């Protein structure tokens, strides 16, 4: 696993995880949701988070720290800043979803 970090003086300004590592870590849950969606297409709106958590602002990989702000509380749980990104994407998905 190869993380990418940027440091400004003594401050960690960005940290990212390779996209393939994100895919491996999340494949189990993504597969479950994909299967659920196939069976419930008329009552379920999919929200794909890979595009909003990975390759943000031209940064390679999946963002862990962005502009010195951590997007994760620990190795599996989003921080408030990370959750805000997800909430924005959920709202966007709901507003733009066409059945």
Image: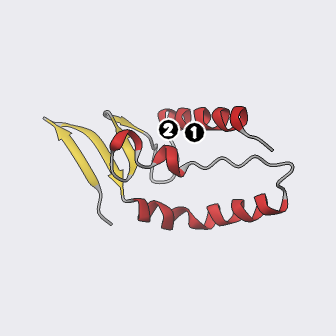
Residue 78 position (above or below residue 68) = below
In the rendered image, residue 40, in percent from the top left (x then y), is placed at: 84, 56
Helix, strand or loop under label 2? helix
Q: What residue is drawn where x is 51% and y is 33%?
A: 80
Q: What residue is drawn where x is 33% and y is 51%?
A: 60
> Farthest front residue?
98
In the rendered image, residue 7, in percent from the top left (x then y), is placed at: 19, 41
Q: Nearer the viewer, residue 31 or 75?
A: 31
In the rendered image, residue 59, in percent from the top left (x then y), is placed at: 33, 45
> Farthest left residue?
9
The Cα atoms of the two marked residues, 2 and 1, are separated by 7 Å
Q: What residue is drawn where x is 79% and y is 62%?
A: 38
| Residue 92 falls left or right of residue 41 | left
For residue 72, what is the image quadrant? Answer: top left
Numbered disc total: 2
Q: What residue is drawn where x is 34% and y is 50%?
A: 16
Q: Which mark is residue 86?
A: 1
Q: Which residue is mark 2?
A: 82
**Which quadrant does the N terminus fall into?**
bottom left
Q: Are marks 2 and 1 in contact (CB under 8 Å)?
A: yes
Q: Which mark is residue 26?
A: none
Helix, strand or loop under label 1? helix
**Which quadrant does the C terminus fall into?**
top right
Crowd class of label 2 (few under 14; some 14 to 19; many from 20; radius 10 Å): many
Colour scheme: secondary structure
| Residue 37 falls left or right of residue 47 | right
Crowd class of label 1 (few under 14; some 14 to 19; many from 20; radius 10 Å): some
């Amino acid at each position: 696993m190869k993380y990418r970090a940027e440091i400004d003086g003594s401050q960690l300004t960005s940290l990212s995880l390779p996209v393939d590592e994100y895919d491996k870590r999340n494949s189990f849950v993504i597969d479950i949701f994909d299967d659920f969606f196939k069976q419930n297409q008329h009552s379920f709106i999919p929200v794909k988070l890979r595009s909003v958590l990975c390759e943000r602002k031209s940064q390679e990989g999946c963002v862990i720290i962005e502009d010195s702000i951590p997007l994760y509380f620990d190795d599996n749980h989003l921080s408030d800043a990370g959750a805000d990104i997800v909430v924005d994407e959920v709202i966007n998905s709901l507003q733009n979803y066409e059945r």
